[in-house]
Structure formats: structure tokens, C-alpha cells
Image (spheres, helix red, strand yellow):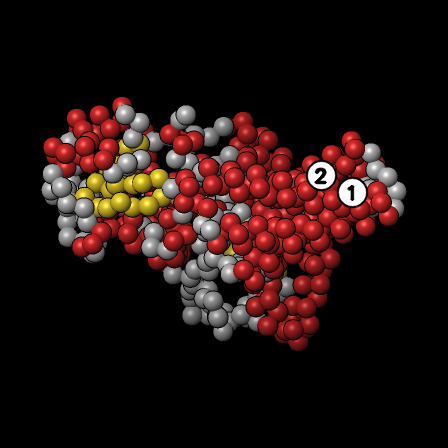
Amino acid sequence: MSKASRYGRNTIADKLFLLGEVCLLSLSSFLASYVHNIYLFSVSLEQQLLNAVLFSASVMLCALSVGLYDQKLREGQKGIIKRVVMTLIFNAMLLELIVFQLFPSLHIGTAYLAAASALAAVLLSAFRALFHYHDITRISRRRVLVLGAGERASIIERRMRRNVDKRNFEIVGFVPIEGDKDAAIPEHRLTQFDYKNDLFQFVIEHKIDQLVIACDERRNMLPVEHLFKCKTRGIDVIEILDFIERETGQIAVNLIYPSWVIYANGFELNQRFRTNLDYKLNVVLALLMLALTWPIMLLTALLIYLEDGRKTGAPILYRQLRVGYDGKPFYIVKFRSMRTDAEKNGARWATANDDRVTRVGRIIRKYRIDELPQLLNVLSGEMGFVGPRPERPEFVNQLAKDIPYYNQRHNVKPGLTGWAQLKYPYGATAEDAQEKLKFDLYYIKHRSLMLDLMILVRTVEIVLFGKGR
């Protein structure tokens, strides 16, 4: 078993959870078919099996789109039930309006789908409550020892305070290493022992699964022989950069050093996919989105015109200069959501409750409707569906000076949505830009067709819950 699979994001608890949901969804489908056979007409076993597979897969896809498989979802039981109900409503729409229309032979009946959905709502809500109440993730948490208790190690302590951040591991302690700078790690979190001579023995006695190298100074400070012995005995030894990347889905910009970027796995691009196929997929998706959203776009244009365009002649759309692929400027097209004099005093960040935003603009920004005209940028090849959000040149120039590696986000085509939009809330400061860069770099390192598709599906959650801007 490779370390990537052993210490990746799919733990035993995650697999048991997914298996449990598949079984419950299949059970809901078979029970609904059984009731259908009694009160309506009989359905063959083959069709029952096919519908169970279809129903389970469709529900799990919809659950992914509303964030139910987000490992760091912070919702109470009422919030979970709300999302489960939304999942099953979307599932019914997906099956009835698309799948069963394309493949009518798969359609058992509306009564079957209603019964299966009702059963699934009860079973999934109860299962999730039971799963989290008993905290089943404990069965696969690995025991982690951090070698270091200085500035670098303190990042783990600061960024992973909540229980949801530590669902896959438990920190046994932080080992102070010679050369560490003073940091704010609490005294009770420190583990003191003669690490130069007793590291391997300590690891074995305390059943450590993973060692995280997080010391501030490592030249001649680490017991290399002990680390080598731990490695050969199956103990995972990992850099703090890689540890944070795996557990948070971001790259700690302030810890990066050039050799790590050069020698790290990832950042490779399949040029054929990223040029020919990628553009074709984006064009197809853009045309589909235009076909689906043109009524919303037409209504939005009408509302903007009625609010202030009719009297003042203010435009419905506006173009704004942004920095794109390879740092080349281009103009994005958006629905106007601010007053025409919004930048009479110069460019500035948009804020959460910006007084420059119009009444219509506040709504369309919340649900990202203002960005629909950027489908034209996708069709022209200036943007893709997934990628770092393009920023304004005025801000980029300053951010590139203040934030290390900021310009690396221009190594890929900007997108309508992205990993940072999924993982980070509304941001309107230079500090927020640095936090989002950590997620953008993670995306650039790991980008693939599957990751892009997952981000697209998860973007539904951003729109539904008004997390966009």
C-alpha cells in the first residue's frame, strides 16, 4: 500500500461512510420497487437492480453538489437534513427532467421515485446523525508526532484548531528541536525527550504513524539515522508543506522554497488536454450554460435597465480589464452590479456590504448571476470554466510585490469558478488574496479533468447558498 493511499484523504472511515450510504440508497430503491410491485405493476429484477444503481449514483452526485461530502462541512443536524432534502429534490429533477427523458425505458414511475426519495431522506439523515454522534472517524485516525515547536510548527497549531480540521489525525505532541524560534505553542502540547537518541524508541512505544518535519533549522539538527529507521519500519515521514497540503487542500505560501516547487510531484500539464480538448470542453459547456440560463440573463438585463438604466442611460453590461493567462490583460464582461460612479475615486476592493452596489446588483452578486456574461470570455478562449479568478492589474501589481509566488497563478487560464472559491469565503483584502493564492497553487499543482469536474459540481453549492460575490 502506497503512502499516498494510506495517508490520503480517503480513510477507512470515509470508505465505510460511502459504503453505508450506497447500501442505504440501494435499500431505499429496492423497498420502493417492492411497494410499487404490490400496489401498481410488477417490475423485473433486472430493472430493479438497474434503477437501484441509477438512483444511488444520481443521489450521490447531487449530494456532492450541495456540499454533503465536504469533509469540513460545519452544519448542525438541521442543516444536514436541509441539505439531504435539497439533494433528493435535485435528484428527482435530474432523473425526471433529463435521464428519464433521454432513456424512457428506465422510468418505473413517479410513485417509485417519490417513495425511494422519502425513504432515502429518513435513512440518510438518521445515518449521518449516527455516524457523527459516534465519531466513527476515530477508527482510522493516524497518530502524528511533529518534529519542531517553532514558527513553522506553530502553523499546524494555528490552522488546525477545530475538530473538523483534525478528523483524519491526532497530534501526539510537538517535539522542540534545537534552532527552533520562539512560538506560541502551549506548554501542554510539547513533548520533551532525547529525540537525538530515543526518537525511534519513542515512535514505537507510542504507536506513531506519521512524523512531520517542521523544525525551523534542520542542518545537523535532525537524527537522520532514526528517521531512516522509522521510514524503513513503515512510519511515514513527511515535510510540513506536504502535510498541510494534504490536510487543508492548500499550499502554505509562506513556507515554500524554490527547490520544493521544482522537485515536488505535481504541476505537470498534459499539453494536449490543456490546449485542444480543454478548449473544446469549455466551449461545449459554455453553449449548454447559455442555452440553460438565457431566460435568467434576459430577466437580469431587464431588472438592471428598470432600476437605473431607463432613467440615466447606464449600461446593462460593463467591461473591466483583468490579468489572464501568462499575465496578458483581457476584458471580462459582466452584468453591471454597481453604480456608474463606483470608481470615481479610483479602483478599490469590493467589500461584503459595499454601498456602491445597487439593489439588483446585491442579488445577482450573491448568486453569481452577474458573472454569466463571462461565458462569452470562455467562448473566446480568454477564460475557462475552472481556474483562478482573474484579478485587476491595479491589484495584481501590488499583490505580486507583497505576496511570494503570486504571479504563478497566471500560469494557467483564469476561470469562472475555482478551488479557492469552494474553499475560502468572501474576501476583499490583500490578506484574503494571499489565502486564496494558497488554494490556487494547490489547484495548479493537482489540476486534472476529474478535479475540474468536481469543482464544477461543487459550484452548485456556492450558487445555492449565496457564497459567491
Return the residue nearer the eye: 262 or 49.
49
Circle on res. 266: none
Is residue 315 visible in the rendered structure shown here?
A: yes
Position of 262 relative to 65 (above/below) = above
According to the picture, the residue beneath numbered tag 1 turns out to be 33
Circle on res. 52: 2
**Side of 316 relative to 388 (left or right):** right
Asked if disc 2 and disc 1 are in contact, CB closer than 8 Å, the reply is yes
Q: Position of residue 65 (x, y in %)?
A: 59, 49
The secondary element bearing badge 1 is classed as helix
Is residue 333 visible in the rendered structure shown here?
A: no
Position of 71 relative to 46 (above/below) = below
Ranked by sequence position, the earlier of labels 2 and 1 is 1
Return the residue nearer the eye: 114 or 147.
114
Count of numbered marks: 2
Return the residue nearer the eye: 35 or 220.
35
Disc 1 marks which amino acid?
A: Ser
Q: Position of residue 68 (x, y in %)?
A: 55, 50
Q: How crowded is mark 2: few (under 14 residues within 10 Å), some or many (20 or more)?
A: many
Return the residue nearer the eye: 337 or 149.
149
Disc 2 marks which amino acid?
A: Ala
Residue under the point 24% across and 46% down: 173
**Closer to the camera: disc 2 or disc 1?**
1
Residue under the point 40% across and 47% down: 167
Q: How far apart are marks 2 and 1 (CA)?
A: 9 Å
Residue under the point 35% across and 58% down: 431
**Side of 124 relative to 163 (left or right):** right
Q: Where is residue 442 in the image (x, y as percent from the top left)?
A: 41, 41
Q: Residue furthest top?
A: 232
Q: Position of residue 19 (x, y in %)?
A: 57, 38
